[in-house]
Amino acid sequence: MMQEHFFKGIKTEIRNKDNMVLQIDTKDQKSITVSLKDKGKVVKSLSEENEYGSQVLLPLIMKLLQTTNIELQTLQGIEVEKGPGSFTGLRVGVSVANALGFALGIPVNGKRLETELHY
């Protein structure tokens, strides 16, 4: 069951898109919450409950970005819940956050992954 906080079913136009941070909360294995924050304040939040919460995380992130007209590439950082909580749920959240952070070149929980890839 999907829940939209603040503006149910309405596209939310966010004026200042320069400081957007994606927040991922997967500490409860069956309930996933993703939020967009601007200067530390939550602007928009979506949550969904599912027996396998990990299956809804990426679609939920994309839906949040689409409803706010924010592009993935404009995010300035990612914050992910570190616990306590479900080990599997936290592991999924951290893995997705690290993958997105690496792909977009943005910090996760304030830290950048500084890795030089050699092929």
Image (spheres, grey):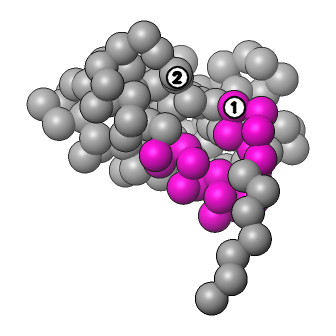
The picture places residue 90, in percent across and down from the top left corner, at 39, 28
Residue 117 placement: quadrant: bottom right
Label 1 Cα crowd, 10 Å radius (few <14 / some 14-19 / many 20+): some
Q: Residue at x 77, y 33 (%)?
A: 110
| Three-letter code, disc 2 | Glu
Amino acid type at image mark 1: Asn
Is residue 78 shown above or below 86? below
Please tell me which residue is depicted at 46% across the width and 15% down the height of the picture. Answer: 83
Residue 6's x, y, as percent?
53, 18
Residue 100 within the segment the image draws in magenta? yes
Residue 109 magenta: yes
Residue at x 61% of width, y 42% of height = 68
- Neighbour class for label 2 at 10 Å: few (<14), some, many (≥20)? some
Q: Which mark is residue 81?
A: 2
Quarter of the image with the N terminus in it: top left
Rendered image: mark on residue 109: 1
- Give the camera-side residue of 4 and 113: 113
- Which of the two labelled residues, at mark 1 and mark 2, occupies the earlier sequence position? 2
Q: Left or right of 58: which side holds 43?
A: right
**Whole-Å distance between the Cαs marked 1 and 2?**
9 Å
In the figure, is residue 100 to the left or right of 90? right
Q: Is residue 84 above or below residue 34?
A: above
Kindly state the secondary structure of the residue where label 2 is placed.
loop
> Hey, which residue is sitting farthest top in the picture?
84
One can see residue 89 in this view:
yes
Stretch in magenta:
95-112
- In the rendered structure, the answer to whether residue 26 lies left or right of residue 5 reads left
